[in-house]
Image (cartoon, rainbow, N blue to C red):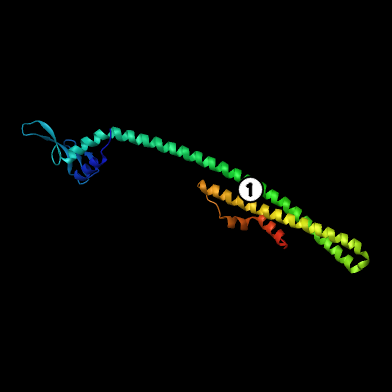
Amino acid sequence: MTIDTQKLRDLIRQACPLPWTLATSNSWRRILDPYHVPVCSPCAQPDGHPDLAFPGGAEGPTARLLVEAANALPDLLDIIDAANKQVAEYARMADQVRADADAKIDAQATEIAGSRQTIERWKARYLNTKQEAVALKRDISDYIRIGNEQGTEIAEARGQIEHLDKRNEALRRELGALMRGYVNLLENGRNRIMDLGGQCDPVDVMEARDPWLRDARVALSGESNG
């Protein structure tokens, strides 16, 4: 059965004002509105038969509202029960979505932690190579001051410097690529979290707060991170 809600609303507007109460005071039981005006009260017809009196008569909006509302009540309760079941199912689905989102966030955090460890290893290799190059350049400067008699050895040392410089530059490029990949992972992780309805800092804020990324950039710039 389809409940004609508009019909019920029209009857509510036309009938006695709600809420109604059941009342008795040393007299016949009757239904009253908030202003103590009878909504339904017992009476006797001129021929002596007992009857019920309604404002507007037996076909008026108040009497019709009592009948229509009582008839609609079973279907209304069915609708409420179905709605409650649907709400419970939506709540279960929402819990599942939250659980899946938490699992994906945990997996993304593990992946980011692994990337940080990789960057740390590459950063250490780069810094060691850089320190070797600086020490070798210092030694070469000493050889140059001694004199040109050691020209052959100096030429070999210069070749080693060039080799180390090339290696240093290659490591710089690899470290830069890893940093870009790491930032991309941060951005992808943030996008996944936002897509799943979570909250996350902007990428530039995460970059500024990340000590591993900050140290890697300091290493590339040649400045001290102390």
**Horizontal and vertical percent for residue 59?**
14, 37
- Residue 141 lies, with reference to residue 75, above or below; the image says below
Q: Quadrant of residue 38?
A: top left
Give how far across and how far down residue 225 sits, in percent.
71, 61
Q: Is 70 above or below relative to 214?
A: above
Q: Front-most of 41 and 6?
A: 6
Tell me the element at label 1. Answer: helix
Query: Disc 1 residue type?
Result: Ile
- Lateral position of residue 162 relative to residue 61, left or right: right
Quarter of the image with the C terminus is bottom right
Residue 133 image-quadrant placement? bottom right
For the question of whether residue 24 can be seen, the reply is no
For this orientation, the residue located farthest to the left is: 47
User: Residue at the location (55% across, 49% down)?
Assistant: 191
Q: Position of residue 110 (x, y in %)?
A: 63, 45
| Residue, disc 1 | 112
**Residue at image x 67%, y 46%?**
114
- Residue at image coords 43%, 37%: 88
Image spot of residue 135 (x, y percent)? 83, 61
Q: Is residue 65 left or right of residue 184?
A: left
Identified at 57% across, 42% down, the residue is: 104
Q: Nearer the viewer, residue 60 or 115?
A: 115
* Figure disc tally: 1
Q: Is residue 144 above or below residue 101?
A: below
Q: For the N terminus, which image quadrant?
A: top left
Extreme right residue here? 149
Residue 31 shows up from this direction: yes
Is disc 1 surrounded by few (<14), some (14 to 19) or many (20+) residues within 10 Å?
some
Tell me if 86 is positioned left or right of 160 in this view: left
